[in-house]
Image (cartoon, rainbow, N blue to C red):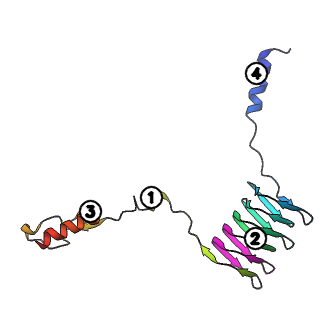
Amino acid sequence: MFSRAKKQGSSASAVQSPPPKPASPSVISTDMRITGDIVSEGEIQVDGTIEGDIRTKVLLVGETANIRGEIVADSVKVHGAITGQIKARAVTLAASAKMYGDILHEDLAIEKGAFLEGHCKRIDPPEPPETKAVGGKVSFVVKSGGPEEGDGPGDGDKPATSGDQIRDQKKAVAN
């Protein structure tokens, strides 16, 4: 009845639990004041006061909210007051928003009536690795032959990746 085989079988099924379902948004109500940093993998709605940094996927700042700190998120919608920097893919400042600080964004929307004192800087999404330059070097096409062959600069198709190689080849052509 209570053998080891059954206990081992039941512990194996406990390890393979289903993935957790998405949590409902965390709400910081108007009567709540938080001093410290907040980190969440989901959505946060702030209607109260926060003095600290916020890192989350989605942040909704209500009209009664007052935040002092840095915000890092995928999406930020501001209806209240923020003093600090926002780094997010998408930022929306509603007409009732009061923003004191810089915004680093991919997409930015500012409604008529919103207050912004700070700089806005667009940040480009990361490029796929296959489109980036390798090692930060640029390849040039230079002449493959020397002056003894009577070729002019630019003939041939030998690639060179160093400025020193190009200067040495130009000196050889000039002599």
Q: Badge 2 local density, few (<14 within 10 Å), some, or many (20+)?
A: some
Name the secondary structure under disc 1.
helix
Mark 3 / mark 1, whichever is N-terminal? 1
Circles 1, 4 touching at the beta carbon (< 8 Å): no
Question: In this rendering, would 157 be left or right of 87?
Answer: left
| Residue 111 on the magenta segment | yes
Alpha carbon separation for disc pair 2 and 3: 50 Å
Is label 2 or label 3 in front?
3
- Residue with the most extreme right position: 31
Whether 39 is drawn above or below 80: the answer is above
Q: What type is the residue that disc 1 sits on?
A: Glu
Q: What type is the residue that disc 2 sits on?
A: Lys
Q: Which residue is mark 1?
A: 130
Mark 2 / mark 4, whichever is N-terminal? 4
| Foreground pick, 65 / 8 | 65
Alpha carbon separation for disc pair 3 and 4: 65 Å
Residue at 77% over, 85% down: 113
Q: Which residue is mark 4?
A: 8
Q: What type is the residue that disc 4 sits on?
A: Gln
